[in-house]
Amino acid sequence: MDRRATEEFGIPNRILMERAGLAVFQAVKELLPDGGCLTVFCGKGNNGGDGFAVARLAREHGYHVELLVAAEADQLSDEAAEQMHIAKAQGLQPVFADDDRWERKVEVVGCRDLIVDALLGTGAKCEVRGPVRQAIQSINRSGVPVISVDVPSGIHCDTGEELGESVWALRTITLGLPKPFLFEGIGLEHSGCWSVAEIGYPGSLLHEPTDARLIDREWVANMLPERLRASQKGDNGSVVVVAGSRQMRGAATLAARAAIRSGAGLVTVAGVGDVLNAVAANVPESLLLPLPEADGVVSPEAAKVLLDRQSRYSSAVFGPGMTQEPSVAEFFREAWARWEKPCVIDADALNCVSKGVDLPAGECVLTPHPGEVGRLLHCSIAEAQSDRFRTVRLALEKFGKCLLLKGPYSIVSEPGQAMLVNQTGNPGMASGGMGDVLSGVIAALLAQDLPGYYAAGCGMYWHGLAADHCASEIGPVGFTAMDVANALPGARARIVSACDCI
């Protein structure tokens, strides 16, 4: 985008640098509104040029600024050198890595009020070394708040992986568009609180289609099915939840409660006797379909019972709490051979797929967490998480179905579509049952004729927003999956009302 803004639209690179510097300086003023002492670390490339602009602006506004450059003067790019000369004309005296004062200056940054990290930008691909590594280590030891320019130095922009050492930022001001490192790997943690700064890229560049988009409340509100005034329960979808076992009775309850709270007209739970007893006690609105069982799990004969009633349902959830017993895998094999309704494939159903059970031929939404997607792709969790966007692409190539990869900034995609990246949710969701609730939400949207790609995208945003409400009202840690299910109606109201749709 930098190159095209200059070559195709005639915007000089120095103008982009000035605007980037101004955007970062605004963040400096937010953290140090009454002035103070800051150290600006610059590298030799264009990211360093942004840093020189920040340093100059801070000095002009009365901040005490120390400027440390992790390179020698003759190593600076042309654009960075130009910004360096402007900064020097304004009275700043940069200390370069070959200066006798460098070692001492780097070691005493802990006495500053704020650090600006402009060492490495989006082009960094190799392991950090030399003065840059030394600077990063000193920054992280200092205990001083850090603002990173565009990307925390030492983070691979495309994967979020750490290049040996990386800055742990309090804030990251990324330029133009969000970038993959914000959503995965070490970058997800080291970016801190991030925001996107508009620095003057032409709108036609900013709005070109990309491989992924960050979905927002307006997008979700426009997708959610509208409830007509004259509608009846039969008009709002019938969901069947095939879930649970004697050892895991709660999963079916959570999925059923979520489907009801998400507006499904009818919800049926199909399961073994112990599961149905638990559902009857906790979700009295549900209908019950007993399935033949063997030792507390569904037996293969249950497939015929379910298939005989397939026409009654609009969508299904398969898998939560069902175990991986051979009889369960055989049940899925027989049921899915003739299953035609849209469905959510979750939990133990995914584990059976990883062992060779074929998916239904019709529309499916697969909802794996990192461990499950690792089993599906026969790789480790670390490999799956090292580049989540690549992991989603691999899963699409292998299964050809819509997939939702759960985790911080969940990702949804299907063949031929851009990836949808979620921005709701919080760390308090790292507890049992949250995935069961998500499955129920998506199944309710499928039952109301929303295609799987959009049902999964809307479902993950809605589910995360309900959890954000729980974190705010109950506390950031300790709210339960049932709390999230019960918060779904209020979350939907906030999505729709915020966009003036009611």
Image (tube, helix red, strand yellow):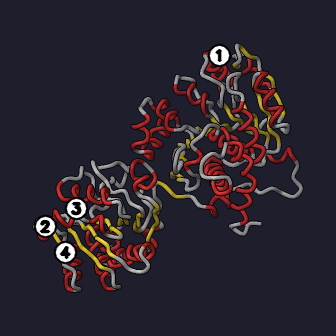
Callout in the foreground (4, 2): 4
Sequence-wise first label, 1 or 4: 4
Sequence-wise first label, 4 or 2: 2
Quadrant, the N terminus: bottom left
Considering depth in this image, is 303 or 110 the residue closer to the camera? 110
**Residue linked to disc 1:** 327
What label sits on residue 94 in the rendered view? 4
Q: Position of residue 238 (x, y in %)?
A: 79, 40
Q: Can residue 363 be seen in this snapshot?
A: no
Circle 1 residues within 10 Å: few <14, some 14–19, many ≥20: some
Q: Position of residue 83 (x, y in %)?
A: 23, 78
**Residue linked to disc 3:** 107
Residue drawn at (45%, 32%) of the image: 377
**Residue at mark 1 to residue at mark 4: CA–CA distance:** 71 Å
Callout in the foreground (2, 1): 2
Q: Which residue ends up furthest to the front in the rendered image?
A: 111
What's the residue type where badge 1 is placed?
Ser
What's the residue type where badge 4 is placed?
Pro
**Residue linked to disc 2:** 72
Query: Which of the 4 image quadrants contains residue 309?
Result: top right
Sequence-wise first label, 2 or 1: 2
Residue drawn at (33%, 68%) of the image: 116
What's the residue type where badge 2 is placed?
Glu
